[in-house]
Image (cartoon, rainbow, N blue to C red):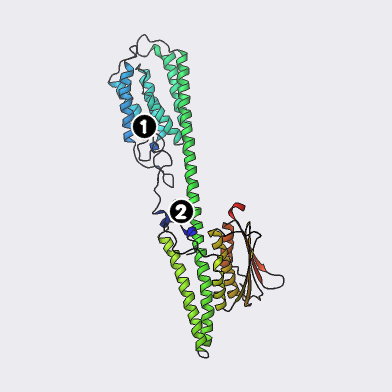
């Protein structure tokens, strides 16, 4: 059918029959953000309503816990002046990492729990080591989940607590004979904390960007679906309106002449059969395209080269059409398929409106090919019949939509000397 390329649905958008099924809900971003409930930061899968899932990040939390326990054991060998790791130390490390199980559902609790357990660990005089990873993951999760104040507060609380332990409370805390930490070390720790929170903020920004991109993709898919629906509606309207108008006129002729002139009535019925057969064929091609959007069209899209067929169909409906084709100097070449189809449909709809709404039985079609595109003018001499003689229904709206889709314009209205005129300008793509 005409316009198969236009009617083919996009693979990434459009109605469900073009996409192959409903979309799968997935958290927008890289897989390690909890697409399956085992990421290292951020909430879990988020549906259209933004609700968090109830999944628990068991695997990632277990991985962090094992890393902290094993890594702290190795780190203790290089810090003989600190307290040796015992059962209480390992319980604190498990507590610091274990609260990360709640980082998706309750990120504020997770970040403060990790910071508190880590502070108690250092207050007990145990060695520095990868236990700080629990604070990093908790802070990152809280920021990405949108709890920025809580993440900054937990980081600030941890730093202030470490200052108190390292420069004041160390006198009364293990290990015995400990001394104050150098201030250079505190500067390094402060820089480390700022870097952690900054990276968390970067993760939050990236997540928001992914969410915006995802929303834009959904809007684009919705627009494509709307455009697809409008294209199908226009195509079916143009095919059916023209053919049914011819059938209606010929049916009236056949009924009027059935007794007085059976031969003429037979000719009207023959025209009805041919018009209905053509309409059924074109509608079938549209429906076949919907069922198998990836297949090539079985017939070429109609274009201005089929104007003689329109003239014959209009003549069978009692309308005499005079067609004038004008070429630009040097020739403009053939039109692109989409423009050729739109030009054909505009002429078809304009002639259909004349058959349905005009008292004139004569129409003039002027097609002027230009270097910048094509100009179309369809005139009739009127007078109009009926309240809707101007063709202000779906047909005229469909013509305007076809022209607008190609960057063109449609003007339709009564002529000063009587009758009605439809003028269309369709520019080529490179001239838009």
Query: Going by the image, does 428 lie left or right of 206?
Result: right
Under circle 2, the secondary element is loop
Dot 1 crowding, Cα within 10 Å, few <14, some 14–19, many 20+ = many
Which residue lies most toward the left here? 87
Q: Which residue is mark 2?
A: 10
Q: Which residue is mark 1?
A: 100
Which residue lies most toward the bottom here? 260
Q: State the mark number for residue 304.
A: none
Q: Position of residue 198 (x, y in %)?
A: 48, 28
Identity of the residue drawn at 45% across and 17% down: 163
On screen, 277 above or below 183?
below
Q: Is residue 393 visible?
A: no
Identity of the residue drawn at 39% across and 24% down: 132
Identity of the residue drawn at 72% across and 72% down: 417
Image quadrant in which you'd find residue 164: top left
Q: Position of residue 375 (x, y in %)?
A: 63, 62
Which residue lies most toward the front here? 330
Camera-nearest residue between 46 and 150: 46
Under circle 1, the secondary element is helix
């Amino acid at each position: 059918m005409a316009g198969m390329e236009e009617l083919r649905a996009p693979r990434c958008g459009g109605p469900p029959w073009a996409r192959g099924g409903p979309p799968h809900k997935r958290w927008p971003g890289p897989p390690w953000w909890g697409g399956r409930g085992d990421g290292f930061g951020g909430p879990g899968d988020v549906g259209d309503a933004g609700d968090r899932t109830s999944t628990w990040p068991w695997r990632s939390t277990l991985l962090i816990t094992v890393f902290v326990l094993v890594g702290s054991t190795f780190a203790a060998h290089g810090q003989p002046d600190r307290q040796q790791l015992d059962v209480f130390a390992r319980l604190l490390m498990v507590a610091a990492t274990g609260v990360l199980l709640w980082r998706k559902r309750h990120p504020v609790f997770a970040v403060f729990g990790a910071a508190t357990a880590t502070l108690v660990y250092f207050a007990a005089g145990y060695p520095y080591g990868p236990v700080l990873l629990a604070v990093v993951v908790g802070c990152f999760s809280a920021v990405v989940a949108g709890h920025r104040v809580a993440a900054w507060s937990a980081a600030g609380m941890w730093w202030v607590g470490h200052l108190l332990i390292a420069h004041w409370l160390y006198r009364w805390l293990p290990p015995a004979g400990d001394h104050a930490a150098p201030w250079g070390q505190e500067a390094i720790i402060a820089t480390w904390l700022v870097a952690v929170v900054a990276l968390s903020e970067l993760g939050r920004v990236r997540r928001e960007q992914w969410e915006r991109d995802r929303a834009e993709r959904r809007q684009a898919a919705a627009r494509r679906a709307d455009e697809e629906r409008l294209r199908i509606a226009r195509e079916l309207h143009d095919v059916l309106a023209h053919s049914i108008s011819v059938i209606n006129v010929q049916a009236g002729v056949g009924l009027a002449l059935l007794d007085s002139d059976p031969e003429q009535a037979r000719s009207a019925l023959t025209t009805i059969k041919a018009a209905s057969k053509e309409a059924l064929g074109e509608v079938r091609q549209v429906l076949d395209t919907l069922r198998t959007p990836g297949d090539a069209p079985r017939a070429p899209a109609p274009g201005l080269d089929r104007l003689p067929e329109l003239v014959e169909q209009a003549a069978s409906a009692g309308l005499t059409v005079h067609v004038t084709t004008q070429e630009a100097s040097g020739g403009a070449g053939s039109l692109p398929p989409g423009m050729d189809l739109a030009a054909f449909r505009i002429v078809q709809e304009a002639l259909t409106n004349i058959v349905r709404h005009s008292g004139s039985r004569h129409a003039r079609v002027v097609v002027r090919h230009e270097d910048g595109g094509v100009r179309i003018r369809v005139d009739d001499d009127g007078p109009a019949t009926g309240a809707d003689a101007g063709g202000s229904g779906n047909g005229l709206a469909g013509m305007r939509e076809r022209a607008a889709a190609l960057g063109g314009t449609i003007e339709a209205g009564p002529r000063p000397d009587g009758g009605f005129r439809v003028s269309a300008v369709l520019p080529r793509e490179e001239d838009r």
